[in-house]
Image (cartoon, rainbow, N blue to C red):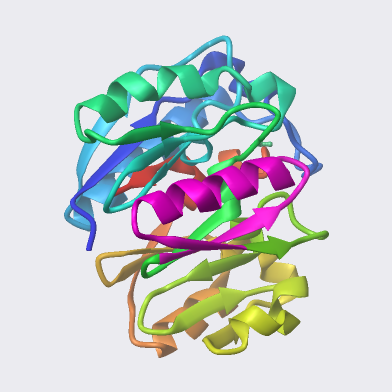
Amino acid sequence: MFSRAIVRRPAKSLVNGLTSANLGKPDYENALIQHEGYINALIRCGLEVTILDALEDFPDSTFVEDVALLTPHCAIVTNPGAASRNGENAFIKPALEKFYQQIEIIKSPGTVEAGDIMMVGSHFYIGLSERTNKSGAEQMIALLKKHGLTGSIVNLKEFLHLKTGINYLENNNMLASGEFLTKSEFQQFNLTEIDTDEAYAANSLWINNKVLTPKGFPKTRQKIESLGYEIIEVDVSEFEKLDGGLSCLSLRF
Ligand code: GLY
């Protein structure tokens, strides 16, 4: 169970964020409204939410999940692989110091964005992507080991981040799309296939036995409901325009 979350307000520069989505530029005012709705959903899940100020120099900085991995034993500040995001990491450490005594750092030439990391109990699956490289993943595994946790590498080709296409809902339930449906390491889980036309909703987010799903993906919603979860639907369409999903918008711990 989680008790806290950290989010970062969207910057006005959000409109210049990285994207491959072809959905147009996000509307800043609407993004602020949707961000508030997202915070309210976290509060409904019982989380105390720390809201960090916007960082205008970093258009993608509202996707705060990427700059740290928070575990029950330690926090690990990452080193984002996207050039325009490298530097966001320096601004997360002061916020983490309020909550963590043990803070580790991923160092260059290693790069990691924590959207590439999926926690399953005390094990962490780490995607090798355009943002997370082998050196970064190996540093991450060594740091996890130092704190009594384990990690393993997953190769990916189709998705921006690991959790763009696969997410753990606890109780052995996992949502998977595309290439992740057939990967051997995930066959031990109860895999729920997310249809290609709803692939964005594979990034649904378990928090304290509720599941946040993005608004507008009815087939996925029904599949998750049939697993027995209470759903909280959240409109994050402005963030979808930047390839950002529900998990990307917060750090939960
Ligand atoms: N726009 C989110 C990212 O590319 O990191």
Please identify the quarter of the rendering in which residue 217 is found: bottom right
Q: Nearer the viewer, residue 121 or 192?
A: 121
Say left or right for 209 vs 205: left
Rendering quadrant holding ligand 1: top right
Say left or right for 132 vs 248: right
Identified at 69% across, 84% down, the residue is: 184
Say left or right for 25 vs 211: right
Identified at 64% across, 41% down, the residue is: 136
Place of residue 122 in the rendered image (x, y in percent of width and height, measured from the top left): 37, 66
Say left or right for 30 vs 196: left
Q: Residue furthest top?
A: 57
Query: Magenta span covers which residues?
Result: 123-152
Above/below status of 200 relative to 29: below
Q: Nearer the viewer, residue 172 or 13?
A: 172
Can residue 246 be seen by looking at this rendering? no
Q: Is residue 129 magenta?
A: yes
Place of residue 189 in the rendered image (x, y in percent of width and height, measured from the top left): 52, 86
